[in-house]
Image: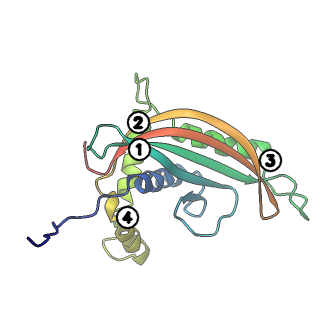
Amino acid sequence: MPLTVPTFTPCPNVGSQIERAIAAWFVACGIGDVTSNHFSNDNTPRQAPLNDILAHTSVEKVENSRIEVYQVRIQSKFDALAQPNQSDTAWNWKQINDWVGNVMSAMSLRNTGDRDFKATADFITAAGRDLAVDNSAGIDPIQVKRALDNADMVDFTCEKVIYRGAKRVGADAGGALLFVEIRNFEIHAVPANVD
């Protein structure tokens, strides 16, 4: 009997969806812009200050459900105050702490009376889904391309956000000294609309 291959459509990559949705949420919140919020497969040049967003490890919440629970690392990176051959980077401690504080605030929103971060999950869902929308009705080629590139986000749903701690490190990238603030989250998400 010959092999008959079924017709199927690709399953969305939930980890990639989470990263893109969080980056879009940060841009909507005014934490940098599209050039300073990067997801793992984004190969555009990086210039501090920036956020690197990586959804790196997952398990299925319910077996065979495609509802995944991801560990997500958000690295906020800043030029150190003393760069080689440079006397002032124009970023002081208050600016650095405000950036990190805004990341934490954006990831810690609650609805009135709630004890969890469901409001954050809802905003991440909305920001992610908005990536799949061409708000220009086909007129702006940048929006058209963005919507096509993110067509898999149309039904993305972030269900839950849980804070999992922080780490503070310094890094040496190509001779530049960086301050790095790491925030870890557990994100529950699904590629299908479950509103």
Task: Identify the amino acid type marked 1.
Answer: Phe
- Which x, y percent locates residue 67? 32, 43
- Per the model, the C-alpha gap separating discs 2 and 4 is 23 Å
Q: At 63% across and 48% down in the image, what residue appears? A: 75
Q: Please, is residue 110 above or below residue 194 in the view?
A: above
- Earlier residue among tags 2 and 3: 3
Q: Please, is residue 163 above or below residue 19 in the view?
A: above
Task: Identify the amino acid type marked 3.
Answer: Asn
Q: Regarding mark 4 in the picture, which secondary structure is present there?
A: loop
**Left or right: 12 as drawn, with respect to 74:** left
Furthest residue in direction left, as rendered: 1
- Which x, y percent locates residue 102? 60, 42
Placement of the N terminus among the 4 image quadrants: bottom left
Nearer the viewer's eye, disc 1 or disc 4? 4
- Per the model, the C-alpha gap separating discs 1 and 3 is 30 Å
- Per the model, the C-alpha gap separating discs 2 and 3 is 31 Å
Q: Which residue is mark 3?
A: 92
Q: At 91% across and 65% down in the image, what residue appears? A: 85
Q: Regarding mark 3 in the picture, which secondary structure is present there?
A: loop
Q: Which residue is mark 2?
A: 119
Answer whether labels 1 and 2 touch (C-beta < 8 Å): yes
- Earlier residue among tags 2 and 4: 2
Q: Which residue is mark 4?
A: 150
- Earlier residue among tags 1 and 4: 1
Callout 4 environment at 10 Å: few (<14), some (14 to 19), or many (20+)? some
- Earlier residue among tags 1 and 3: 3
Q: At 69% across and 63% down in the image, what residue appears? A: 47
Q: Which residue is mark 1?
A: 123
Q: Regarding mark 2 in the picture, which secondary structure is present there?
A: helix
Furthest residue in direction front, as rendered: 1
Callout 2 environment at 10 Å: few (<14), some (14 to 19), or many (20+)? many
